[in-house]
Image (cartoon, rainbow, N blue to C red):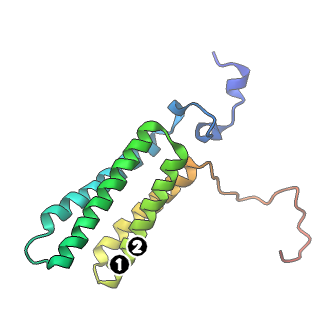
Amino acid sequence: MKTLSESARPATAELSPTVNARTWPWWLTVIVIIGALLTATGAVLAIFASGEHLNAAGHNYADYFITRNLAVAVMLLVMLALRARRVLAALMILTALIQFLDAVTATATGRLGLVPIDLIFVAVFTFGAARLSGWRPSLHRRHSEPDNGTAR
């Protein structure tokens, strides 16, 4: 049976930094794992896709892409395992920014088929990082601030 203090706990308590780490929402774990796997998959594909058609500069770029993606994927999983909320949220925002810039690059180079995937990744990771940080959109005006019709 729940105690009064447990039943009176707000619904946002599962995302509060002071709550036990075991109360993380399952969907957050799922999106971090899927995101890390997709990021690592990009690195693995780059290993096999960098064939003889690349010059030396292209090989160097591919190597940087591989190491960047593997480092981000590993750190996402490590921070998830450690339940390091703030660091994981920051890594998720970094990953979302990388994916956003990938979408911009794909648009500029005409590879438009990749853009929706990148933007979905951006939206999901940004939402997950925001929720992990405890952010909630406020749709209502605060009652303590009277609206006197003047611009702020």
Residue 13 on image: x %, y %? 64, 37
| Residues at discs 1 and 2 in contact (Cβ within 8 Å) | yes
Q: Position of residue 36 (x, y in %)?
A: 34, 51
Q: Residue shown at 22%/69% (left/top)?
A: 62
Q: Which amino acid type is shown beneath numbered disc 1?
A: Thr
Per the image, the residue denoted by label 2 is 101
Rendering coords of residue 20 (x, y %): 57, 30
**Residue 105 marker:** 1
Q: Nearer the viewer, residue 9 or 54?
A: 54
Q: In this image, 78 relative to 111: left or right?
A: right
Number of residues whose C-alpha sits closer than 10 Å to that of mark 1, classed few (under 14), some (14–19) or many (20 or more): some
- x, y percentage for residue 126? 50, 59
Callout 2 secondary element: helix
Residues 146 and 132: in front is 132
At 13% from the left edge and 77% from the top edge, which residue is drawn?
Answer: 54
Secondary structure under the numbered disc 1 in the rendered image: helix
